[in-house]
Amino acid sequence: MALKVTKGISTWQVQGNNVERLMDNAAYSSAHPEDTLVLAGPPRFSDASQSETTGVSSLLAIGMLQTFQVTSQKPTQPMMAIGSGRTFYVSGKSQSTWRVGRLLTNGRNLLRVLYHNAVAGGLSVENFGDPVVPTGGTVNSTFYINLDSELYYVPFGLGIMFKDKADEMLGAFYCELCMIQMYTLGFTAGQNMVLEDVSGLCDRLFPFSPVALLGETPLQRQTLDALIGFTDASVGAMTEGTDASTGWVTGFGDTA
């Protein structure tokens, strides 16, 4: 007998139900780092979509990543008014920070790969007064350094996409207008690798559908749930599937 789902108090069954959603399929429907892709690109997502002339995306996948973290917080101030014992709140714009850790290896280093948008745009980094590449280097140099360089006044963007083991898209967002705040490189005797670490700020976390990036509509297909009988038996009005217009898995609504 298939498990059911508790959507509210009236359907709460401790031994017979999962809460909110079916979890029999959690092993292949959960996000995992190896099914997550991080890409570097232009400052705004509107400039990151597929080129109409070349058919090539302006985003570059970042390899050898060991850590990625993004934090978004919204400044909120509790307030009270004379004559009332209740609290209310005023809130401002969200503030987002990000951090990337990457293996130092042959090829583009982290400060270079993050500035794919500058290289793709043909920016002459070798002509900056404060050098970002060695003397005689060019825009194609693989090792960038020196946060005093004029290059690091130029913003960039980071795209993050999540899939599950069933190859379904779970979500995607774009860190817009990223600026580097700190660069760290450290190593210790006996250590078997050298890691670079970059952290910074961004204007906002902009949600997007991969369809907008790929310029195509994914084929509709049956999910693994339907094939092996893992179905949400508690809510007949909710049917799980794939929306051909977006590629998102559907059927996880809030219907009680």
Image: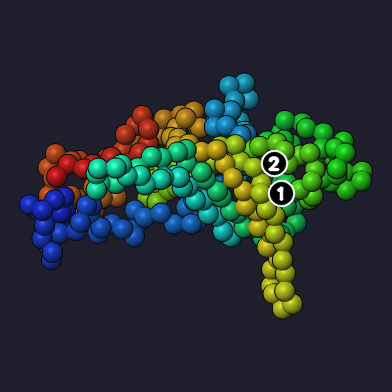
Above or below for 55 versus 16: above
x and y, in percent, of residue 177 in the image: 60, 36
Give the residue at x 72% y 52%: 109
**Disc 2 to disc 1, C-alpha distance:** 7 Å
Looking at this view, name the residue that lies furthest to the left: 10
Give the residue at x 69% y 39%: 116
Looking at this view, name the residue that lies furthest to the right: 136
x and y, in percent, of residue 113 in the image: 69, 46
Whether residue 174 appears in this view of the structure is no
Horizontal side of residue 27 vs 152, given as left or right: left
Q: How many C-alpha atoms fall within 10 Å of the one at disc 1: few (<14), some, or many (≥20)?
A: many
Q: Secondary structure at mark 1?
A: helix
Which dot marks residue 111?
Answer: 1
> Which one is nearer the viewer's eye here, 123 or 219?
123
Residue picked out by circle 2? 115
Which dot marks residue 120?
Answer: none
Horizontal side of residue 172 vs 53, given as left or right: left
Q: How many C-alpha atoms fall within 10 Å of the one at disc 2: few (<14), some, or many (≥20)?
A: many
x and y, in percent, of residue 122 in the image: 77, 31
Q: Secondary structure at mark 2?
A: loop
> Which one is nearer the viewer's eye here, 74 or 198?
74
Quadrant of the rendered image containing residue 53: top right
| Amino acid identity at mark 2 | Tyr
Give the residue at x 92% y 46%: 135
**Contact? badges 2 and 1 (CB < 8 Å):** yes
